[in-house]
Amino acid sequence: MKQFMKFVTAAAIFAASAAASASPIITDIDSTYNAGNQTIAAGGSASWTFDFTLAPYNFVTVRDSISWAELTLKLKDVGGSNQGGLETFSFLVGPGNVLVGSGSNVPNGETPYGPYEITGSSLTSLSDTGQLLVTVKSNTGTSFNWHSATLKATYVRGEDPVDPGQVPEPLSVALFGLGLAGIAAVRRKA
């Protein structure tokens, strides 16, 4: 009987631990793209895709999500006497090229624009795929340089997906074990 009680206690602990689920891991991430002073000609554009599915983030689309993100970009005027002038530009994100910001007359130094919060369909796409397309577009005027882009995000790492057909539920295993222990106890008494 003592052996049976030990087994019942162990099975109860096992079942209780199976009922508890692991908490997701929430991490703030910060990724910077160095555009290397990429020149964007008047009327032209340049794009970059932030990809959190790669190391060191290793985002998994069926497991993880991104609940918040913001983008900051740095531009710099090309400069020179024949390059001076007024330019206008736009910042677009996501597969739908959603406008998140714009401006005019890029200064000569590296100038930050933003931060722009990523919301709506762009945030949904980032959370679903782990990737965000960023486009800097020159609307009018003269050339300017794209110096860098920084994407900050809150990354929620969930539990690894498990095929329920391959792994038995812990509570079912515990109940099965209790049934076997009960049969053993009854056979021992008889």
Image: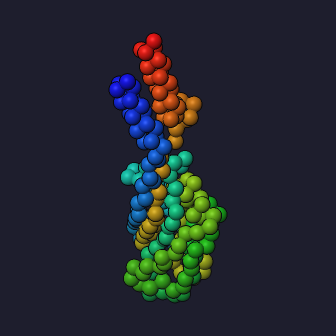
Q: Is residue 169 above or below residue 102?
A: above
Q: How many marks?
A: 0
Taking depth in this image into account, of 152 and 45 the one nearest to the observer is 152
Q: Is residue 64 left or right of residue 32?
A: right
* Residue 77 location (% of width, % of height): 45, 81
Front in this rendered view, residue 96 or 42: 96
**Picture coordinates of residue 19 (x, y %)?**
48, 43
Left-right relation of 8 to 99 = left
Q: Is residue 53 above or below residue 114?
A: above
Q: Furthest residue to the front?
A: 190
Quarter of the figure that contains the C terminus? top left
Q: Residue at x 60, y 77 (%)?
A: 139
Q: Residue at x 52, y 75 (%)?
A: 116
Furthest-top residue in view? Answer: 190
Location of residue 27 by image quarter = bottom left
Is residue 48 at all visible to an observer of this figure? Answer: yes
- Name which residue lies at 42% across and 72% down: 147
Q: Quadrant of residue 13?
A: top left
In percent of the image, x 53 and y 65: which residue is there?
134
Query: Which image quarter is the N terminus in?
Result: top left
Task: Between residue 113 and residue 85, name the one nearer to us.
Answer: 113
Query: In the rendering, at what x and y percent does residue 138 appear?
Result: 57, 75
User: Is 21 situated above or below 73?
Assistant: above
Position of residue 110 measured from the top left corner of the image (x, y, whole percent): 39, 79
Determine if residue 184 is in view: no
Vertical position of residue 155 compared to residue 44: above or below: above
Figure colour scheme? rainbow
